[in-house]
Image: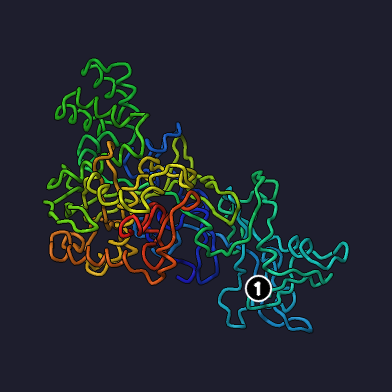
Amino acid sequence: MENMQNFRRSQFVLTYGPGSIIETKKGPRIIPSLKNGLGLEFGGPLLEKNEILDSRIGSILNNGESIRVFEIPSNSRMGKSEKPLYITNKFPAWKICYKPHGSNGHPIIYDGRKHEKCPLCREKDGLNTGKDDPSIRFITACRNGHLDEVPWGDAVHNLSKIKKGKCNHDNSYFTWIAGNTFSTIFIRCPICGAETNMESIYQAGFKCKGRKPENEWVRKGKPSYVADAMHEYCNGRAKVMQRQSSSLRIPETITLLTIPVYDQAIYRVLNGPGVLSNVGMALEDHGSDKEDFLNFLGRHMKNKPFQGVKKCIEEYKFEEFKNFYYKLNNPDISFMDYMYEEFEALSIGSCESEDGNFMVGKPVDISGNEYLPDFQVYPVEKIKTVTAQTGYYRMPYSKDDTMPPIVDIGQNYEDDRWYPGFVGIGEGIFLRYNLSDILEKIACKKAYPAWKSKTNVSEMINTRWTKNVTNNPAFVWLHTLSHSLIKSIALYSGYSAASIQERVYLNGNLTGGGILLYVTMPGEDGGMGGLVSVAKNKPLLNKIFELALDNLIFCSNDPLCSKEVKNENRVNGAACHSCLLVSETSCEHRNMWLDRNIVMGE
């Protein structure tokens, strides 16, 4: 259908989500909040039917609320193959009519909320000129997550060097004088003649009105609108950006592997609807007596989940069952605790989980060289991931070096807070190193002391990864090698580099580290076997590592790239798009903590 645009669940979670602008055949649209986008569908039946039963996401957020994650269902699952499931809003509302207007024949820009058609030529959207998208490409954003139209009236009249007193223009349209650069694009008031250029508008800051268009009502066929009085208070400054800028909305996601301890019957049972809360109440009053515990649950739970708990207690014993519950319900567990668990599970090698969603084969030993220590490569034959998007942040240009606050996208329904997510199935390749071997290789590098220092800009970066991990030179070494491997493995595995994701590990006592490169996709069947076949082919592995090292030695931007040095104001050393930076879908560290010189430098 012309009014529909298809999205994969993984796209929605990893790239888009509430507050993002998508480009469609009908022009740019903003994805509303979960509640506004799903409309009447947002409720118990849809949420519970599509819930991802994994309590770990909630334990990481640990904000005192009941956290739950659901997959946005496909149209086929909902039985709505010809109807849009998630409604979007028009944004921005300002448009440009390219027809010549007035004696000088210039285009005009106009406010689509006030004028359905061009106010001068009366042509709708100016489409007679062959322009598919008449929407203006400029918007404003502030670091507090707000998004709005450019205040063209304020910009033109306040920044103009031509001062003509008070203007009675309603600020609903302006003359657009095109140019080749921002400094030669002028916007002029058709009434008083005041004008300014886009360069001045870009450099200026405007008072933020606290608008979040994703929270506004969906109005079919019309731009969304909420009165200023309903906006949030914000003391920030809004900066002009282009609506397709990658820094306009950066998603905040959590991805966890389903390792063996979380891929068994007891975990599935405890994650059933309402089970954890009922078990908690039962343990509080009857934790010392199994029969009293079961009698309490029998009175307060539905029969099916109760029978599941009863069976687990028979199989795992009451004490083991209680210990597993306390492990899941530990208020002090952190994201890093789960990372340490993942590393240990991957390092065991040659194992398969109870439910079969985690399968690792026998490792292949690879000999080191001048730049690499000896290491092991494990084929990860099956892997299951759970990913949730918890929020986003906006990064317009600012002199403020601190990270902007994260905008939470969760929506409340009854007593729970819901986030969008997806389950991925796929394959991977895992590389394991001893940290002492890595440090032996890099301690003599000129880049090492700068990374060893803890006083740098990365201290101000919001991340769930602790600073003693990301600031560790061995982590930077692993992360740098990981990016180079993504590019070289893509040539032999059948996957594009953008589809390969990474996870870099250091263990809890900082004695071991590793790199997991993996591909997952929603559905029962994930992966084509390309990464596993690479992991089992020692001659091919040697060839891939040789290519990865070549990519670190030579960069088309050298000598400019290689001369970049890590300092307290930089998150990277020698790293650029030609040699190390990869797709934002591949790197969970936003292309930070990279340096060719710590691997290949002097």
Dividing the image into 4 quarters, which one contains the N terminus? bottom left
How many C-alpha atoms fall within 10 Å of the one at disc 1: few (<14), some, or many (≥20)?
many
Residue furthest to the right in view is 165
At label 1, the amino acid type is Ile
Instruction: Report which quarter residue 466 is drawn in.
Output: top left
In percent of width and height, residue 81 lies at 38, 63
Could one spot residue 322 in this view of the protein? Answer: yes
On the picture, is 565 further left or further right than 553? right
**Above or below: residue 292 compared with residue 129:** above
The residue singled out by tag 1 in the image is 96
Q: Nearer the viewer, residue 476 or 282?
A: 476
In the rendered view, does 197 fall on the left or right side of 10?
right
> What's the residue at 51%, 56% (across, down)?
249
In the rendering, at what x and y percent does residue 106 appear? 72, 80
Q: Position of residue 491 (x, y in %)?
A: 25, 70
Q: Give the residue displayed 25% in from the left and 38% down from the top.
A: 268
Q: Residue at x 61, y 83 (%)?
A: 129
Asked whether, in this view, residue 466 is left or right of residue 491, the answer is right
232 or 573, which lies in front? 573
* 299 up-or-down from 222: above or below: above
Is disc 1 placed on a helix, strand or loop? Answer: strand
Which quadrant holds the C terminus?
bottom left
